[in-house]
Structures are given as structure tokens and as C-alpha cells.
Amino acid sequence: MGVPGPFPGSAGTPEGPAMGREEVDRALARLGAEHEAIETSLLALQDHAGRRLLEGAELTGVTKERWATTEQAISLLWSYFDAYTDALRRAREVRSRHRWSTPGELAELTELLRGPGITLPSTATLTGSPLLSEQLSLDLLVDRMNRWYAEALDVIVTADAVWSALPARIDMLSAELHRTRSLAHSVGVRPGEHPSGDDLEQITAELTALRAEVVSDPLAFWKPAAGRSSAPGGGSPDTVRYDRAARALDDVRREIEAVLDVRQDAERRLMRLRDVLSRADRTLSEARQARGEVLAKIAASEVPAVSGPPTALHEQLVMAADYRRHSQWHRLSPLLESLEQRADDELLRARESLTAVTAPLAVRAELRGRLDAYKAKVARHGMAEDPFLVERYDVARRMLWSAPCDLRAAEQAVLRYQRAAAEALAPRQQDPAGHGAADRGSEGERYE
């Protein structure tokens, strides 16, 4: 319900000579309008929904303290209004005695309208005054009523704004929390079994406590507006704790959605894991066979050992299949993520092991290819039957095609054949007709 703003203040005039008749009539008209405005504001304050809620609530904390003071202020406002009404009534009675007021009546009216002739009970609990009673002018009376009215309205409007905003939002979040808990339960996310289940319990407790605190102490959840605005209810509800709970629920919801995703594509991911581990096993088996071949065919070479199959991963894969079979999706989700990474790492390790084991065979194959390439080059230049080159070739070939093969010695033999072929081909490349060829016997002696 809307409430009018502060009461209109009386302009008043400084103390001085008695008021004239027309001045008195204008003052009485203004005071009558002020009286109606004050009465309307007080009645609206009395009927405000926020005030009725505050009166019926079991308050705590800062709201309990401020509402106790506000109730006294509202009670005093009505007492002040009654005093204001009596002063206005007396002034009207004096004015109504004669159409043309006498000087004595004008002096009496001046005292009633301007002087401190209104006696009021002590307001020590609100103003700190030690007096048992006070005497105020109508101006000071209206000023004080304005101030107390604004303070009372601020408490009522603020509490009503918090109650109108936060409990409803908390209830909506609680409903979403209930749906999330039901979904979590369906996929096995329960307190004590999954971190998200514990988080849901904490969020539930927080929302329950938050709602109870908002209902009993709404003023504790009010954030005043920046600056020094004196307007009643200036500010907004403080939603820090609510927002934190909402973010936590979003995090849990995403986690549960991830678990649901696991349920939907668990079989596909399990099949991929089996395939990756199977390829890792085959690669390791090839590496073990290759290692035996290398040890038998290559001499004087350090061949790294090959590890056995990843037994632990296979056991966990069986466990993952068991989780899927029993619909334990909350356990399957983190296990699949761990297994996928470790299985990929295992396949990479197996491939690296095969590469390391077969490296000597790759070196031997490269030397064989290089030897045959130079032999073909020599043959293209018509020197395939050169005795010296044939001898060098045969030495290198015997080393590369014998078992076990000494790679270091074979490499040196291939290099010697390469150098001999290069030197033999050099004169022919300079003189394609064959003129100026060096004596082969002396070449042979040089290479021996």
C-alpha cells in the first residue's frame, strides 16, 4: 500500500507583534490542510502491510531493536497528532467568537499559533531528553513528527521490501534445489557417496537458515543506497548469501549434468577404452617380439626392456563396466575421465617403447639401403665389375646381412665403400669419355 511522504511543515514566522485577522485566517487554513495531510499519512502508515507484518512477526536482531523504537515513535506520533488537533481546535474556537477578532483574541491566537504552548509527555526513549514533559510550538511539533514519521516509514518500507523480494526468491531456489536433489538421487549422487551430494546438503541447510533469518530479521538484509539519500527505503535487499547459494547450486547442477552425459555415452566411452588398451597391448607385444629379434640379430647394442601389459588399467576397466552395469554413474564419471587419460598415455608409452626397441633394426635397414643405393650408382657409371669396389661392397654386405650384426663395424664398412665409390666416380664425372683416369692399381694400393 502506498504511503504519502513526510508531513508538510509549517512555514511559521519569527516572534513579533500580534498577528492580524487576515494573517490568522490564512494560518488557520494552512494548519487545517496540514492536519488533514498528517491524518492521511498516519492512517496510511497504520494500514501499511509492512507494519502489520512487523507487528505479527517474531523478530530478532537489528529488526527487533529498531521495531521496538519505531512502535514507540508511532504511538507518540498519534499523541502528538492529538495535541496538534487540540491546539488547532482551540485556535478555531477563539477565532469563531467574533467575526472581527478583538486585540486580545488576536494576541491569544498569536500565542496559540506561534508560541510554545503545547505541553507533551517526555520522549526520553527517543530523544534522550531528561525532562518529564516538553512544551513545543506547532512548528517544532510538525518538524518532530516529520522526522519520526520518516524514520518509522523507513523501517516499515525496508522490512516490507526485503520480505517482498528475498523469501520468494529463496522459495524458487529451494524448489529448483528439490528438483536437482531428485535428479541427483536418480543418478546415485547422494550425501556421503559423492561430493555433489554433500554440497546439496549444505545448500539446503543454508537456504533453510537464510529464509528463517530473512523472515525474523529483514533489516539485516538491507543495503542502503550509496550517498546520503534520506528517502525512506532508499537502497536494495542484500542478496550476497542468496547469490552465493545460487552459484553453488549451478555448480552442482553442472556436475550432475556431466554425470548424466556419462550415463548417455558410457558404452561408447567404454568401447573406446577397450580399443585403446587393446592397441597398447598389441604394440607392447610387438615391442617384446622386436626386442628378441634385435638381441638375436644386432650385436653390441643396448636394447631397452619392454614393460608388461597395463594390468591395473584392465582391472579398472572391469570396475568401470561393473559400475555401468549397476548404474553407479556418479562413480563411473570420475573413473572414466581418469581411465581415458591414462589409457591414451599407455598407448603413447607403448609406441615409444616399440620405436626405441626397433631403433637398431631401423639403423641396419638405413645402412642396407644406403649401400644398395651406392652400388646402383656405381653400376650406372659402368663400374659394377671394379674389383676394388666389389671387394668393399662384399665386406659391407657380409656385415649387414650377417647375424648378429655389428652396427658400428657395418657403418664403418658402408662409409669406406661410399668413399671408394666417390673417389672412383670423381675422374669419370670430370672426363665423361674416360680420358685421364688414374691407374686402378695405384688406387687399390692407396685404399689398402
Image (cartoon, rainbow, N blue to C red):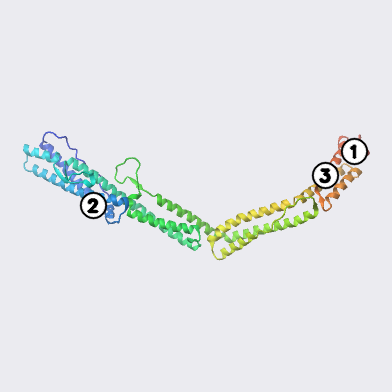
> Which residue is located at x 72 percent, y 51 percent?
356
| Mark 1 secondary-structure assignment | helix
Quick one: SS at disc 2? helix
Name which residue lies at 40% across and 51% down: 241
- Amino acid type shown at disc 3: Gln
Q: Secondary structure at mark 3?
A: helix
How crowded is the residue under tag 1: few (<14 C-alpha within 10 Å), some, or many (20+)?
A: few
Q: Position of residue 204 (x, y in %)?
A: 42, 58
Residues 115 and 435: in front is: 115
User: What's the CA distance linking mark 3 and mark 1?
Assistant: 18 Å
Q: Is residue 61 above or below residue 193?
A: above
Q: Is residue 200 above or below residue 101?
A: below
Asked if the residues shown at circle 1 and circle 2 are in contact, with their CB atoms under 8 angstroms apart, the answer is: no
The label shown at residue 46 is 2
Residue at which label 3 appears = 412
Q: Which residue is mark 1?
A: 446
Other residues around mark 2 within 10 Å, as few (<14) / some (14–19) / many (≥20): some
